[in-house]
Amino acid sequence: MSLDQRIATAFGLDEAGWARHANPWSGWSRALTGLPVIVLAALSRIWLGWWALGVAALAAGWLWLNPHLFRAPANDRAWMTRGVLGERLWVERKARPLPETQTSLPNVLNAVSALGFVAMAYGLVAFDYLAVGLGGAVSWLAKMAFIDRTRAIYDAAVRRDPSLAYKASE
């Protein structure tokens, strides 16, 4: 099982989980709050000491719970919906191979996002707010580019095989 599949499994992204996570409210609320709650949890140790672990647990709980809070979308018209559906295709690329040209850029963008996250994490440990801001910005922008790339993967996959198009369950 790939790292991507392990992460999806840890977040409970089975068939129904992916459908709920494809709701644009899920995707956007997670995209816009994910890094800020991590930063808040890490910096709360300044004010809360060891009690900050409770804030960290709440942040982790939010990140896990978010994909489970929303209903599956009615259609795949939203950019974020198609991005999440494409992310699923990308995560499952071993079972359903994608064209070679579609697999390298998401890997590069994930690596850039991870490097930004590491810089942000360093900043949180060292109280280097420039590293927090720049690392967080790099991580977030690379993640948005990743979602756009997986949106393109979804759109291309549906053009090649219309049976892959999202169908809302009744």
Image: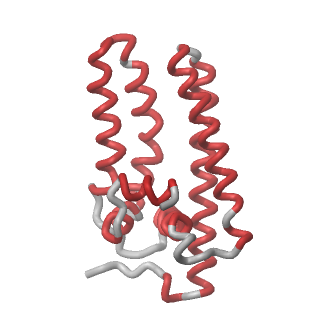
The front one of 153 and 8 is 8
Spot occupied by residue 137 in the image (x, y as percentages of width and height): 60, 35
The front one of 79 and 93 is 93
With 66 as the anchor, is 43 left or right in this view? Answer: right
The color scheme shown is secondary structure
Spot occupied by residue 51 in the image (x, y as percentages of width and height): 27, 17
Residue depicted at x 41% and y 47%: 30
User: Vertically, is 121 above or below 145?
Assistant: above
With 82 as the anchor, is 138 left or right in this view? Answer: right
Residue depicted at x 38% and y 26%: 41
Q: Quadrant of the C terminus?
A: bottom left
Quadrant of the rendered structure where residue 73 is? bottom left
- Please tell me how many numbered marks the rendered image carries: 0
Farthest residue toward the front?
Answer: 1
Farthest residue toward the right?
Answer: 101
Spot occupied by residue 4 in the image (x, y as percentages of width and height): 50, 56
With 44 as the anchor, is 116 left or right in this view? Answer: right
